[in-house]
Amino acid sequence: MINKQVPNAKKALKGLTDGMTLMLGGFGLCGIPENAIAEMVAMDVKKITCISNNAGVDNFGLGLLLQKHQIRKMVSSYVGENDEFERQMLSGELEVELIPQGTLAERCRAAQAGFPAIYTPAGYGTEVAEGKETREFDGKMYILETAFKADFSFVKAWKGDAAGNLIFKATARNFNPNMCGAATITVAEVEELVPVGSLDPNQIHIPGIFVQRIFEGKGYEKRIEKRTVRQKI
Amino acid sequence: MINKQVPNAKKALKGLTDGMTLMLGGFGLCGIPENAIAEMVAMDVKKITCISNNAGVDNFGLGLLLQKHQIRKMVSSYVGENDEFERQMLSGELEVELIPQGTLAERCRAAQAGFPAIYTPAGYGTEVAEGKETREFDGKMYILETAFKADFSFVKAWKGDAAGNLIFKATARNFNPNMCGAATITVAEVEELVPVGSLDPNQIHIPGIFVQRIFEGKGYEKRIEKRTVRQKI
Amino acid sequence: MLDKIGIAKRIAKEVKNGYYVNLGIGIPTLVANYVCKDIEVEFQSENGVLGMGPFPFEGEEDADLINAGKQTITTLEGASFFDSATSFSMIRGKHVQLTILGAMEVSHNGDIANWKIPGYMVKGMGGAMDLVASAENIIVAMMHTNKKGESKLLKSCSLPLTGVGCVKRVVTNLAVLEVSIDGFKLLERAPGVTVETIQNATEGHLIVDGEVPEMDI
Amino acid sequence: MLDKIGIAKRIAKEVKNGYYVNLGIGIPTLVANYVCKDIEVEFQSENGVLGMGPFPFEGEEDADLINAGKQTITTLEGASFFDSATSFSMIRGKHVQLTILGAMEVSHNGDIANWKIPGYMVKGMGGAMDLVASAENIIVAMMHTNKKGESKLLKSCSLPLTGVGCVKRVVTNLAVLEVSIDGFKLLERAPGVTVETIQNATEGHLIVDGEVPEMDI
């Protein structure tokens, strides 16, 4: 077994410097690497490019990095729910590249799996395709999209072990597995670090080979963005 | 819940006719759809093309179909351990297309995921690349390989439910998940069909959406191809 | 004339037995409430869940269990969770049979615009471009005209496109229309709405072929 | 001169702490037995397992648990199972740091041939083409000459290729050689083997730079 465990977020983010490109898991505020984000705020790392489906809300998630003007560019599929984001984007302070959600997921997976590029139909005939190569296969048009290149990938899992094996919970899984092994260094934070050997090898979502560093996170807030309920009848 | 359950192999193979292209899961004799193969022998379907990593052994697995001259063409990465196969191949009776194992897996996954083609480095500069488009990305050469097109996909899982959800066991997983949803009709046979709701939604390997028909198989032989043991000291 | 719930009810009738369905935000979300209880249907949400159920009871919300609209949800028996790449494999691979989504504009050749208004804050396309580029069967749910009273069913979309030639059917507060090579084919009128009213509210080419029945909701 | 176990023992020294390693069939399989016990290493088998352990005890074989050579195996703590596409994601994505495999021929520019002999039954390349096209670090384990006594380290491979310009290092019964732009660089001699013997057994360009030490196994 190859041990990937580090004691805390500070050690896990070692080597992270200004200007780097990062992947961050999560959908909305669900399954985001809260500890890594908090540590980035503490480090005050600047001019980072974030590949992340969303950009958090004003005072949580990636919004915390936006507040401190740490983000130079966002690559996302949807960036609503964030006033400060809007302000920085309209002022030109923040660069934003919007791409289809499935394209985002698959450009991560391509990086993980060693594919240089993929052909996807998403965005054909729209401004997303502008300047990109297009091609017909069996009468349907596709866009060539390249694999992402990132320095760090920050993911959040439910359970993990020192070997780097990960299990995600419910829809907090989302982009997290696709970003594992898709950057030079993948840092996984888990709610619970369990002893090696206690996870069923048959039920591991991400084998440890895709993870370089793992630590047990602290104080997860797991904020709910849109609390919707039904009434008991 | 959409019910995919059928009572037996016979019903599961309904619509299978001569000349079709089939995907079959398994690595060697591990994780092969034994019941579907037995039913194909009983049906005596002819001139089929099999996309399968291996071709079984003389008297088990796909070897049973070879004995009855039911296979017209094999698309595989490795076809050793089978004398009848060799005889039919050398006599020209059986057409064989050998492709790299990772290419085989990904051409299945491409079909499952709606990608028309992929770029892989495997086989570049070899006879596998002959007649195929090649392309450079970041100084490395890749071959364009197209998604498979198949009529039926036959997979074997450990547990499954009527919704088509599947869980595989150990290395009997192999190509089976990649072939689910990669053909027009995916037929899953399982060792144990469990009640809907008894599988943890977090631990399902293949969601039922990729499966059209499911049944509980009978009398699994699970033959071991190379029994290797160590001595107790 | 239908209200939003009426549109949702009419679209619910398009949901057939055995369908996996992806519902967009807004009117499409309401459709789930009106699908016939006698048929087998599963709802997929592109953030990674199949077999979505209703909203949770108060106190039973789980921050780790949301839909693509970021709302807390529940799951039904037979549900499964998966990653984003697998989710879009379901969509791109045409395993999801029906996609229902809203639109700002639809053109009579099936183009759709629903993600960007120049001059306004652009929030992004989310999964909409993948959905419209992939689905075999796309139904648009929207009001027939915008707040200024202008037609949203056009000869050609004026807004940046989400997808080209992909919409199959449009259900509005006034009508059910099919996208054909010749234009919008009027299939049904909303209760009490005349063909003339629909014609006046439709800028794109409208095909009226014989008697047009009133919707049965 | 080394026997097969000697070759395996020498290659085992190339396995470093923290490596994920894929072992081919034959001599490479033996390498696992000789890796230093003080370092952390995991073995990957391309049929879908990471963290392979030794063969099972008699009576404990599981038909559902095999390696890529189809042999029954066991797993160690921290192991995981996965599908074939994920397995080759590990290989193609360069997550497996070291690949050790056998060869019929290697050329001094790093080409390798190990899957096909014209005129003989061709069994297939299995995962070898993916492995050699992807791995950053490929070590070939083989005898220096074939059964006829002809060199297997050539100027140019005569057999159909498995991969081009990919082999980094070759360990034979006679020597350890590095593939460089100028040819096979002789790094070490097997115990008791002279440079002259190696030179005579090597058809490809051999670079001998100063004193060549004897292997320390």
Image (cartoon, coloured by chain):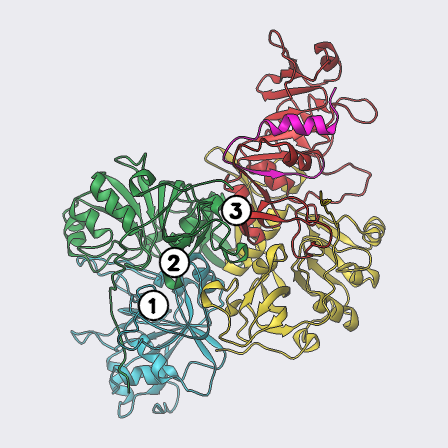
Chain colours: A green, B yellow, C cyan, D red
Label 3 amino acid? Ser
- Please name whichever residue, B17 or B32, is drawn nearer the observer in this view of the structure: B32
Residue D153, percent from left and from top? 70, 23
Report helix, strand or loop for mark 3: helix
The answer to whether residue D86 is visible is yes
Mark 2 crowd level (few <14, some 14–19, many ≥20, 10 Å Cα): many
- Please tell me whether residue C132 is drawn above or below residue D142 in the rendered image: below
Marks 3 & 1 on one chain? no
Identify residue for label 2.
A174
What is the C-alpha distance between the residues marked 2 and 3? Answer: 19 Å
Magenta segment range? D1-26
- Please tell me whether residue C149 is drawn above or below residue D206 in the rendered image: below
The answer to whether residue A107 is visible is no
Identify residue for label 3.
D89
- Please name whichever residue, D127 or D171, is drawn nearer the observer in this view of the structure: D171
Report helix, strand or loop for mark 2: loop
Label 3 resides on the chain identified as D
Residue B206, percent from left and from top? 52, 64
Magenta stretch contains residue D105: no
Mark 1 crowd level (few <14, some 14–19, many ≥20, 10 Å Cα): many
Report helix, strand or loop for mark 1: loop
Whether residues under marks 3 and 1 lie with C-beta atoms below 8 angstroms apart, the answer is no
Label 1 amino acid? Asn
Residue B230, percent from left and from top? 72, 44
Quadrant in the picture for the N terminus of chain D? top right
Viewed as shown, does residue C43 lie left or right of D166? left
Marks 2 & 1 on one chain? no
Identify residue for label 1.
C67
Marks 2 & 3 on one chain? no
